[in-house]
Image (cartoon, helix red, strand yellow):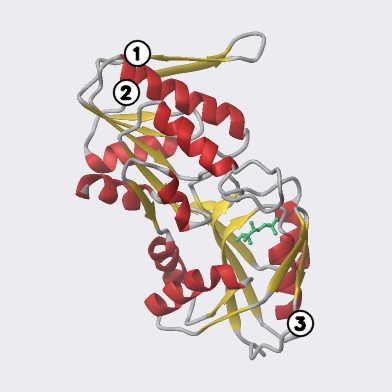
Amino acid sequence: MIIGGSASQKLAAQIAKKMGEPLCPLETRKFPDGERYIRINGKLEDNVTVVQSTGYPQDENLIELFLILKTLQNMDVTNIRAVIPYFGYGRQERSFNPGEAISASVIADLIEFSGVSEVFCINLHETSICNLFNVPTHNLSAMPVIAEYLDNCRDMPLLLAPDHGAINFAMDIANILGSEYDHLEKKRISPDLVETKTKNLDVEGREVVIIDDIISTGGTIVNAIKMLKENGASNITVSCVHPVLVDDALLKIFAAGADEVIGTDTLKSEISVVSVAELVAEALKSK
Ligand code: R5P
C-alpha cells in the first residue's frame, strides 16, 4: 500500500500503479494558523510505503512526513517504508563552521523517531547521509533513467560535471551512452555565489550535456555554460536529478545559453520530464 504525501502525489500514484499496489487516501490541510493537519482515511495493510519529497517548503513537507509516519506507527502498521525522493537539508550534512547545526543528522533522527523501518532516497547530496540512519537506507541513482532520456534524443554528447563532486554522475551516464566525460573545478564563495576555474575544453562544435545532482540558484550551471560557450560548444543541454530551481534560476540558465534544461520528478517543476517512478518501484519490489 502506498501513501502519497502532498509534495509527491503524482509520483506516488505512478509508483503504486507500477507496483500494482493500492493508493491509500490521505487528507492533508492546514489549520487557519498555518499548522499542518493530516488524516489517513484508508484501511491499512501491514506494509505501507510513504512517498514524500522534502523540497520547498521543506519544513512543512517534513512535518507532514513526520505526522504520516508517526500516525502509521500509532495505527500499528508493522513495516513502514519512506521514499524521500529529494532529501531536504541534505547539503548541511556536517558542520562546516563551529556552532553550525548538522541539519541532515537532525532530520534523519526525526524521521527515525517517527517510526520508519526503511528509507529510500534518490541521489542524496552525500552518500554518507545513509549512515545517519540506524534503519536500512538506500541511495538510488537516477543516472540510468536520465541516460535513457538523453539516449533518445542525443548523439554521443560530451558529459560535463560542473564540479568535481558531480564527476561520478557524468561518468555513469557517459558509460551508459558510450561517450566521453570531463569535469570543471568549482569553489563556493557563498550560498548564492560560485567561482569556476577557467579551463580549456575540447568542445568546439560539439554537443554537451551538463549533469549535476541539484540545480538550486543556478550559479554553478551558469558558470559552466559560460565556459562551454567560450570554448565553442554547439549545443548545451543541462540535466539534473533535483530541480530545486530557486527564484529565476531557470531563466538565468536559459539566458546564459542553454538549449534545453531537464530534471527528474523527485521535485515538481517545469523541467521535471524524467520520471523516477520505475526506479523507485523496482527498488521497493526488490527489498
Ligand atoms: C553542490 O555541490 C551541488 O552538487 C550543486 O552543484 C549545487 O547545489 C548547485 O547549487 P547552485 O545551483 O545554487 O549553484
Give residue 198's mark. Answer: 3
Question: Which residue occupies 45% across, 57% down?
Answer: 127
Mark 1 vs 2: CB contact within 8 A: yes
Q: Position of residue 172 (x, y in %)?
A: 42, 73
Answer above or below: position of 187 versus 242: below
Is 265 displayed left or right of 81 in the figure?
right
Give residue 120's mark. Answer: none
Mark 1 vs 3: CB contact within 8 A: no
Q: Amino acid at mark 3?
A: Thr
Mark 1 secondary-structure assignment:
loop
Question: Which residue occupies 62% across, 64% down?
Answer: 260
Few, some or many residues within 10 Å of mark 3 (<14, 14–19, 20+): some
Residue 150 in view (yes/no): yes
Q: Amino acid at mark 1?
A: Asn
For disc 1, the marked residue is 41
Give residue 24's mark. Answer: 2
The quadrant of the picture showing ligand 1 is bottom right
Q: Is residue 95 or residue 201 the one in the foreground?
A: 95
Marks 1 and 2, how far apart at CA: 7 Å
Mark 2 secondary-structure assignment:
loop
**Farthest-out residue, top:** 32
Residue 268 in view (yes/no): no
Give the mark toward the camera: 1 or 3: 3
Q: Earlier in the sequence, mark 1 or mark 3?
A: 1
Mark 2 CB in 8 Å range of ligand 1? no
Answer above or below: position of 58 versus 171: above
Is 92 displayed left or right of 284 in the figure?
right
Question: Which residue occupies 23% across, 33% down?
Answer: 21
